[in-house]
Image (spheres, helix red, strand yellow):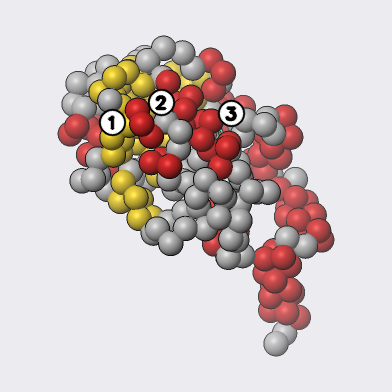
Amino acid sequence: MDFGAQLRSAIKAGRKRRAAWVRLLDTTRLFRTGEGRARLCTRLVHRQRVHQTAPDTWEERYPELFDRAAQLMPNARRILSFGCSTGEELISLRRRFGAAEIIGAEINSRSRRVAVRRLASDLQASVVKPTAVSGEFDVIFALAVLQRGPHWVDEAGVDDLSAHYPFAKFDQMVRELVGHLRAGGLLCTMHTHYLVEQSSAAPQLESLSDSPPMCGPFFGPDNRRLATQSAPSIYRKR
Ligand SMILES: C[S@@+](CC[C@H](N)C(=O)[O-])C[C@H]1O[C@@H](n2cnc3c(N)ncnc32)[C@H](O)[C@@H]1O
């Protein structure tokens, strides 16, 4: 094995063990780009509130989910995209919800600025800090946000998420989001570490079994890995 391959495999093994030197290396890498620095800054400043810190997103990322939500709620008037990153999700939603007021909430100030620029010509769309979200919504999307470092969780075969992203953090956020849904409104989720139906907001929700499936791994309220591999992605508030 050449030196490069040896180094890559040492890094992979170190990442699995969460070795301090690999964490330092990963943090140093983030310093090299504006996006990485913004991510680090978000982690530091919003330590308590931030969920997934990676800003990865693209247009039409979940077409089946967007289409199903639009079929279920064609006349939605107010939509929240929680964790909208740089705004591509809002553009995908605008294609399906032509007349709705669409609000993107984003905690990372750099991503928020990019999203504001991207949506500048859409007078019915806005991008705000999560603390500025107010009122009730017909549909809330929380996509690839209620999680933390899923690739690492997979690669390292993590069995207990308590130290990394505890159930309580997920649970509190789901409750907050459900609090912003009107009765009959839809909560759409994708890529979550935990199951919405195991959250304390579950009694207020009914899962739509014909919604596009969301894939695991999933963890339980005790933060331990579950055998469940699939869950509905859309929930209706009773
Ligand atoms: C992986 S991106 C997902 C973007 C988009 N929803 C998608 O699925 O393509 C996750 C985003 O959630 C944001 N985020 C994390 N915690 C947040 C919070 N408490 N409030 C608002 N945004 C948050 C991150 O800054 C990041 O931009």
* In this rendering, position of residue 179 left or right of residue 36: left
Residue at 61% of width from left, 56% of height from top?
160
Q: Which mark is residue 178?
A: 2
**Mark 3, residue position:** 107
| Residue under label 1 | 236
Q: What SS does tag 2 mark?
A: helix
Secondary element at tag 3: loop
Label 1 is placed on what type of residue? Arg
- Give residue 101's quadrant in the image: top left
Q: What residue type is disc 3 on?
A: Ile
Front residue (pair 120, 64): 64
Left or right of 147, for residue 179: left
Residue found at x 73% / y 79%: 6
Measure the alpha-carbon separation of dots 2 and 1.
Answer: 10 Å
Q: Is residue 34 visible?
A: no
Q: Label 3 neighbourhood size at 10 Å, few (<14), some (14-19), many (20+)? A: many
Mark 2 vs mark 3, foreground winner is: 2
The residue nearer to you, when weighing 3 against 226, is 226
